[in-house]
Image (tube, helix red, strand yellow):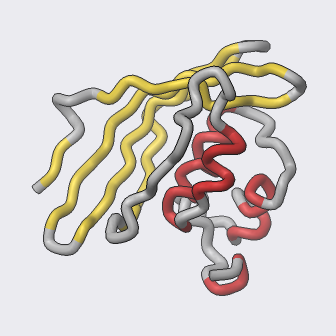
Amino acid sequence: MTMADDPTCPCGSASPLAACCGVHLAGIPAPTPEALMRSRYTAFARGDARYLEQTWHPGTRPEHLDLEPDLRWTGLEIVAAEAGPKRGTVEFRAHWTDGRTWGVLHERSRFVRQSDRWWYLDGVIDPEVTSAR
């Protein structure tokens, strides 16, 4: 799938993909933790494991990232976002479906700014909100 196949960005911004998260997927570093979170969600929605690995801090990145091919990400809600000069957090809810099952992943992600760019560091999943039906 190319960026022209779906002009609306999956991150929920209602902007065209090429003008929103597409620029980050193409190599321009995200300017804020929230922009990085949105672009990582878009990468999950598009199955772009390469981008997810490239934006994950080398100190916490898993050796290999396996994406679930049948999982479809259907919506992103940013609950809260904070950014300082070197650290940031983004709390979000990501909606998904897998055939007849659907659910919500609720996470508070941590980001760090090093080498003139933001990196995804790690996240804490809220099991009380994260659910599947």
Relative side of 25 to 82, left or right: right
Does residue 132 lie above or below 113 as drawn?
Answer: below
Q: Position of residue 59 (x, y in %)?
A: 64, 21
Relative side of 90 to 133, left or right: right
Q: Residue furthest bottom?
A: 5
Q: Position of residue 74 (x, y in %)?
A: 38, 64
Q: Observer-nearest residue: 18 or 59?
A: 59
Relative side of 28 to 71, left or right: right
Regarding residue 82, the answer to whether it shows in the image is no
Relative side of 7 to 31, left or right: left
Does residue 77 lie above or below 68 as drawn?
Answer: above
Q: Residue furthest left?
A: 133
Q: From the image, which quarter does the N terminus lie in?
A: bottom right
Instruction: Examine the image and state in which quarter residue 131 appears.
Output: top left
Q: Residue at x 53, y 44 (%)?
A: 64
Instruction: Examine the image and state in which quarter residue 42 appears.
Output: bottom right
Q: Observer-nearest residue: 13 or 58?
A: 58
Regarding residue 120, the answer to whether it shows in the image is yes
Q: Position of residue 57 (x, y in %)?
A: 66, 28
Q: Position of residue 106 (x, y in %)?
A: 33, 37
Q: Residue at x 38, y 32 (%)?
A: 107
Q: Residue at x 63, y 24 (%)?
A: 111
Number of numbered labels in the structure image: 0
Q: From the image, which quarter does the C terminus lie in?
A: bottom left
Q: Residue furthest front?
A: 63
Does residue 48 lie above or below 52 as drawn?
Answer: below
Q: Residue at x 69, y 40 (%)?
A: 55
Instruction: Examine the image and state in which quarter residue 113 appears.
Output: top right
